[in-house]
Image (cartoon, rainbow, N blue to C red):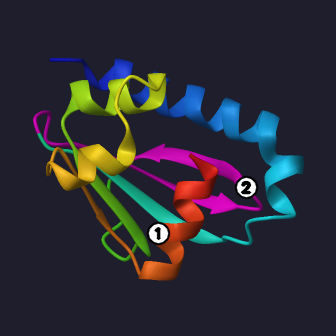
Amino acid sequence: MASVDECRQALQDLAARLDHNAEAVRERVDLNRTLACRITDLDAAFHSRIADGRLVDLADGDDPKAKIAISTTSDDLLALVRGELDVTRAVASRRVSIKANPLDLMKLRKLL
C-alpha cells in the first residue's frame, strides 16, 4: 500500500506531465472541471481543477461537489500515473471508478 505522500507526489507528477503537454492538448480538449481523487484504502482524498489541459490547485481533502470524481486504491493510482495500468481496463475491471458525464469522460481520456 502506497502512502498519502506517495499519492500526493503521483498527482503532482501527473500535473507536471499535463502542464508539459497542455499546449498541444488545449486545442483538442476543452475541459474545465473540478476533480476529486478519493483513495479508498487510505481514507484520503485530494481535489483539484482541470483547466485548459492542466491539473491546477491540487490540495488535500475531498470536494463532494466535484464534477469529476475518481476513486481507486493507492497502488492503482500510482500505477495509473506511471502508465503501468490502462485507465480503460482499470475502469472495466472496477479497479478504478470515475463519475462524470459521458462527454467529460471522453475529454478526460484524451488528457490521460
**In which quadrant is the N terminus drawn?**
top left
Instruction: Give the answer, above or below, for where 35 lies relative to 112.
Output: below
SS label for mark 1: helix
Mark 1 crowdedness (10 Å alpha carbons): few <14, some 14-19, many ≥20: some
Measured as percent of width and height from the top left, residue 51 is found at 71, 62
Q: Is residue 11 left or right of residue 88?
A: right
Picture coordinates of residue 12, whole percent (x, y): 56, 30
Q: Could you say which is closer to the camera, residue 42 or residue 68?
A: 68
Q: Nearer the viewer, mark 1 or mark 2?
A: 1
Dot 1 or dot 2, earlier in sequence: 2
Range shown magenta:
41-61
Left-right relation of 8 to 43 = right
Mark 2 residue element: loop
State how far apart marks 1 and 2 are (Cα): 14 Å
Residue 60 horizontal/vertical position (percent):
40, 43
**Residue type at numbered disc 2:** Gly
Numbered circle sitting on residue 53: 2
Viewer-side residue, 41 vs 97: 97
Q: Residue at x 62, y 52 (%)?
A: 111
Horizontal side of residue 107 vs 19, given as left or right: left
Residue 105: numbered disc: 1
Q: Which residue is depicted at the point 46% across and 69% down?
A: 105
Q: How crowded is mark 2: few (under 14 residues within 10 Å), some or many (20 or more)?
A: many
Which three-letter amino acid code belongs to the residue tagged 1?
Answer: Leu
Main secondary structure of the magenta stretch: strand
- Residue shown at 66% from the left, 71% from the top: 32
